Image (cartoon, rainbow, N blue to C red):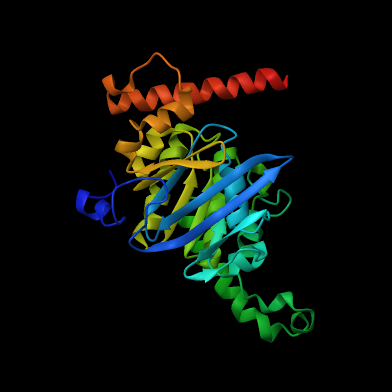
């Protein structure tokens, strides 16, 4: 586990439960609802995200995880609810302003601009670029120094993510895993306080998965808060300090990774309330494998129905 028992216990005030109060929350959300055609995609009464920790947001497909991400980061608007980031309300704040305040997110499907180079994609992630102003753009002395700083920052990050040899290549030439690395590196160009990763391991080969895991742990080591959506329970157990479980739009469980794997609410969310397997008789590794297999079967069934 990433933390010792003492460090982990310091995350919360009280016993693990949905909506439990955190010792030092960076995000606090209350009464957040988002409906689509009468269906409650998100219906979160109260949740807090602990500062400086790695929190996993898990749940079966259709649980509302990505929609909740979109609401928090200003890419969607709720029907009801309020939330704050770093002590300041950001409900209704546009996505670009949320990013400027230090909350940056990535997407399940990478958003690299394919016909720009890797370096150009990185430069786009930086804030405070005087050259974006038309009048200032006509005076190179006003923006050249900042551009050099941005380029140096980009070079450092590309080297850190082992993409420096790809700096001049089109983003379209990168593999799926390399695009994930590029998106994470670009998100760091703005020096965020918190980074939100939507299924960062999806479609990534095992070698790059380990690289991404190390990078996420490095983010925490620098004091950054990480919230990520993930289906792979082995990944969750390996790097998460805290786990939040969603099902049918609601928060049904919260806890430390080892506790969540054996939580009855989590078992019901993944397997249904009527199932024959007693997870209490399985090891943590076996529990994770069963939840992974169940999620994979759900996804295969959805693909068959779509076809």
Q: Quick check: 175 left or right of 208?
A: right
Residue 56 position, x and y percent, is 43, 45
**140 or 307, which is in the foreground?**
307
Q: How many marks?
A: 0
Whether residue 166 appears in this view of the structure is no
Quadrant (top left/top right/bottom left/bottom right) for the N terminus: top left
Q: Quadrant of residue 13?
A: bottom left
**Left or right: 182, with 218 as reference point:** right
Q: x and y percent of residue 89 in the render?
A: 55, 69
Residue in the picture at 73% in, 19% down: 307
Give the answer, above or below, for where 173 lies relative to 103.
above
Whether residue 224 is visible here, answered yes or no, is yes
**Between 33 and 138, which is closer to the camera in this rendering?**
33
Q: Is residue 131 above or below residue 297?
A: below
Q: Position of residue 205 (x, y in %)?
A: 50, 33
Q: Residue at x 29, y 48 (%)?
A: 15
The residue lying toward the viewer, choosing from 305 and 192, is 305
């Amino acid at each position: 586990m990433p933390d010792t028992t003492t460090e982990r216990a310091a995350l919360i005030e009280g016993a693990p439960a949905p909506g439990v109060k955190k010792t030092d929350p960076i995000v606090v959300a209350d009464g957040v609802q988002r409906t689509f055609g009468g269906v409650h995609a998100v219906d979160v009464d109260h949740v807090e995200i602990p500062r400086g920790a790695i929190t996993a947001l898990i749940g079966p497909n259709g649980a509302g995880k990505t929609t909740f991400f979109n609401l928090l980061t200003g890419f969607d608007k709720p029907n009801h609810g309020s939330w704050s980031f770093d002590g300041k309300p950001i409900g209704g704040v546009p996505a670009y302003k949320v990013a400027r305040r230090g909350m940056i997110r990535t997407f399940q499907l990478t958003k690299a601009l394919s016909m720009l180079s890797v370096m150009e994609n990185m430069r786009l992630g930086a804030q405070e670029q005087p050259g974006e102003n038309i009048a200032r753009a006509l005076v190179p002395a006003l923006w050249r120094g900042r551009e050099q700083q941005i380029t140096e920052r980009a070079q450092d990050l590309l080297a850190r993510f082992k993409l420096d040899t790809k700096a001049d290549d089109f983003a379209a030439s990168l593999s799926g895993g390399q695009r994930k690395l590029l998106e994470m590196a670009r998100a760091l160009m703005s020096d965020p306080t918190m980074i939100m990763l939507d299924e960062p391991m999806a479609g990534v080969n095992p070698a790059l998965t380990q690289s991404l895991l190390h990078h996420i742990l490095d983010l925490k080591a620098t004091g950054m808060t990480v919230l990520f959506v993930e289906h792979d329970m082995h990944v969750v157990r390996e790097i998460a300090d805290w786990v939040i479980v969603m099902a049918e739009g609601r928060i049904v469980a919260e806890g430390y990774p080892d506790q969540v794997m054996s939580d009855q609410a989590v078992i019901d969310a993944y397997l249904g309330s009527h199932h024959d397997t007693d997870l209490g008789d399985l090891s943590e590794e076996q529990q994770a494998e069963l939840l992974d297999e169940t999620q994979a079967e759900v996804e295969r069934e959805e693909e068959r129905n779509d076809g």
